[in-house]
Amino acid sequence: MKRYIRSDTAGRYTQIQNDVVQRYNITLDEFSTCRMRTHAHPEERRVCKWHPKNSVASTFELLHEIGHIETTKRSMRRCESEYYATQWAIDTAKEYGLIIPDKLLNFYQDYIDRELLRGQRRHGSGYDEKGLKLKV
């Protein structure tokens, strides 16, 4: 496991990635043996399977996973967890002056909407009929 991404001639996004990893005390486990996709372990403050790239998409994905660590509560439904993690990522990206492309924001909003509909199909109660819409 490692705590920093790269230090030699790092690009803008890589510098932001390094900063948030240090700022929020995150451990990165790029070669984890757990699940196949990028995910967070909030209790351990660890992000697994995230592969660093000097890009806005990679940076936002890392921010989203750190958002799970910073915002997830055990009582949250999946759609709420995804919403608050993504909203945290948007707010943090703004702090760094990042502009998140609409295509990427739409991808995350669609995911939140799918999780909301899935919960409703499973007869969950108390869902907000308006859904959980990201604030950009």
Image (tube, grey):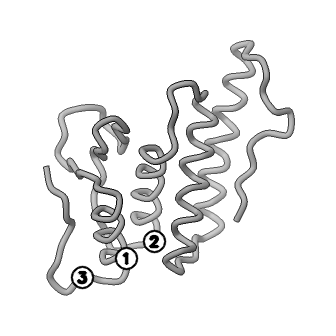
Is residue 53 toward the left or the right of residue 31 in the image? right
How crowded pointer 2 is (Cα within 10 Å; few <14, some 14-19, many 20+) is rated as some
Q: Quadrant of the C terminus?
A: bottom right
Q: In the image, which disc is placed on residue 63?
A: none
How crowded pointer 3 is (Cα within 10 Å; few <14, some 14-19, many 20+) is rated as few
- Identified at 58% across, 63% down, the residue is 90
- Residue designated by label 1: 13
Q: CA distance from mark 2 to mark 3?
A: 14 Å
CB of mark 2 within 8 Å of CB of mark 1? yes
- Residue designated by label 3: 10
User: Which amino acid is tagged 3?
Assistant: Ala
Above or below for 51 versus 33: below
- Residue designated by label 2: 56
Label 2 or label 1, whichever comes before in sequence order:
1
User: Which amino acid is tagged 2?
Assistant: Val
User: Which amino acid is tagged 1?
Assistant: Tyr
Is residue 109 toward the left or the right of residue 28 in the image? right
Q: CA distance from mark 2 to mark 1?
A: 7 Å
Q: Secondary structure at mark 1?
A: helix
Looking at this rendering, what residue extends furthest in the bottom direction?
9
How crowded pointer 1 is (Cα within 10 Å; few <14, some 14-19, many 20+) is rated as many
